[in-house]
Structures are given as structure tokens and as C-alpha cells.
Amino acid sequence: MCVISYSARGKYFILLASSFMFPVSVSAQCIATTDCATLGYTETSCPNGKGIKCPFGDKWACPSSKEETCAEYGFKYDCSGTGYASGSGTPCNNKYASCACASGYEWKDGKCTKRAGAILGQCTGYAKNCKIGQILNIDGSCSDYRVSGVEPVGVVAYIGGDGCGQALALEGLGGFEWSTEDIDIPDLPNYSNAPTNDFASCENTKTVIDYSYKQYGDSASKYYPAFWKVYNYAPSTETKGKWCLPAGGVLESIYKNKTIINQSLIRINKVNIAYDMWWSSSENNQRYAWNFDMSVTGGFGRINIAKDAANSVRPVIEF
């Protein structure tokens, strides 16, 4: 058999003279072999298809198999380490042009970097990337299903036009009084009608927490049990002090979306929305506060719900 050898970047390759024509300096020789490796076809792939495939095998002859030549074509990543899943595409000299990243990471600027998520307990605008009914995870990401190795925190229950969201806790905390005293909390808005436009769960909660601690110090939880119960709620250390008593508008959103919220709760084996009366952080006056009926009929309770009535408490967290 006659073959042609040619030089590329100082390395010689042997090609079949009967099958190819090349505009390069060549020298012909005849050898008695049809073995791809002997002919110089030893690579499993070539960068960007720059090479010649052995006509009777699956090996390739590339311009060079040296690492620096592969890197010239962008094959320079070994795709290993935290946040990496595998290489993308076919490797060149065991290097890849890009990498597939693990869950929670994304390929950016030549590396797998932690995907930007929400900051739990703060409004960053990230909630615009989420949907009501999705699971909110401890890393600030939202997902339709449980993500392996990532702890669920709550279920998205409200998303504002500003990209701020609130997620419902995965469990209820029981029944508690809004307050044991008749005080119109300073700086807390009063709503004479159903507070459907009050979404300030955490602002309301902070106002009551700050007022009660200023008045009663370490005994404040005896006077405002519902607020202190959510404030001290800590299903994980990362979320301690970040939970809030939901405002009226958020409770209404929970009620309107309870079907899809319950679907996510079921997927992660958590407790459904309880069909009873839930306290909101929205105040009516010194004697009364607003609660919401989560039963089939639904709706805000009458304004004659005294603050010292024990209603269900289930926190939300801002993100």
C-alpha cells in the first residue's frame, strides 16, 4: 500500500495516498500495513475537527497531540473539583473546551461558579426568577422538585412586582395570641378594612419585636407570643431571626395559591396548609388584629378578632 506522509508543526503524519490530496509538501512511501496506529492515526478526536480520520478505522491524525496545541483550540479544562459534574463534548488530550456544572453552579468566565441565588431574609429582586408554588432552597435557589443535597426551606407563596418574594414555612408552629395586651403599636399601620394590600410581613414583625423588647426586655415573648414564636423559629441556623408573621396580603396570596403550594409540600413530604384561622401581622387597632380563614370558604376574619385569641401561626421568610 502507498501512503503519504506530511509535516505539521514539526510532527510527521502518514496518510493514505489513494484517498487524500493535500496542498503540503509530501513524500511518498509504500508500506505493507493497514494498521491505523502504524499509519499515525492514534487520536480519539481532534480539536474542532482539525485532522484526518483513518479511512478504515475510528482513529484520527491530528496536527499535534501536545497539550499546548489542544489549548490553542480551547481544550484546557479538566472539569474537576467542587461544582463540576463532567466535561462537555469530546476531549482533546484529556482536556475539554467547557464543563458541565453541578446543580447550583453555572459555567461562567471559564469555570463553574456558584449560581447567584436569593439571600434568605433579604429582598434582592431574585424572586423574579421564581414562581409561586416552587420550593425555596437553603442556597437561595428555587426548584420544582427537591434537589439532591440541597435543603428545602419553604414554598414560594408571594412574589411582588419589585422581584421581592416570601416563602411559607414547611410547618405550622401551633396556636398563639397576637398580643396579651390592648396596645396600638406605634409605627404599625392600622387597617380598618381587609389588609389585602399589606405585604410588609417582615417590616410589621420587626416593628412589633422592637417595640415589645423595648417595653419588656426578655419578657417580651409573654406579651406578643405569635411574633416572638416566628422570630425564634430556626429550622436551620442560617435562617434564625429571619422568619416573619405574614401580612394580610401575603396570607391572601397563600390562600389563592394553596393548591400548587400544597403540591410542593406533598412532594417533599411536608404538612399541607391547615384549614383554620391564621394570624396576620396586620393590625386593626389597639384591641383587634386581622386573621385569615384558610378553610374552603376562606377570607379575612371579622375585625372583632381580639388580639388575645389563639390562632394558628405559620411563618414566612423573605427572599
Image: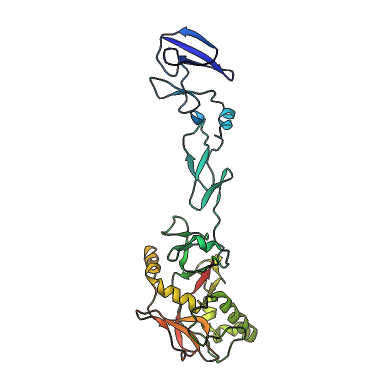
Up the image or down, 140 lies above or below 181; here it is above
Q: Tell me residue 252's x, y (percent).
A: 44, 76
Colour scheme shown: rainbow
Q: Tell me residue 126's x, y (percent).
A: 54, 61
The residue furthest left is: 296
Can residue 314 be spotted in the picture?
Answer: no
Up the image or down, 80 lies above or below 223; here it is above
Q: Quadrant of the C terminus?
A: bottom right
Q: Tell me residue 239's x, y (percent).
A: 54, 67
Residue 1: name its quadrant.
top left
Front in this rendered view, residue 193 or 79: 193
Name the residue rendered at 40%, 68% in the picture: 261
Left or right of 34: which side holds 123? right
Residue 10: name its quadrant.
top right
The residue furthest right is: 214
All told, the count of numbered labels is 0
Up the image or down, 9 lies above or below 101; here it is above
Q: Tell me residue 188's x, y (percent).
A: 59, 83
Can residue 97 be spotted in the picture?
Answer: yes
Front in this rendered view, residue 252 or 21: 21
Left or right of 35: which side holds 218? right
Name the residue rendered at 48%, 12% in the picture: 4
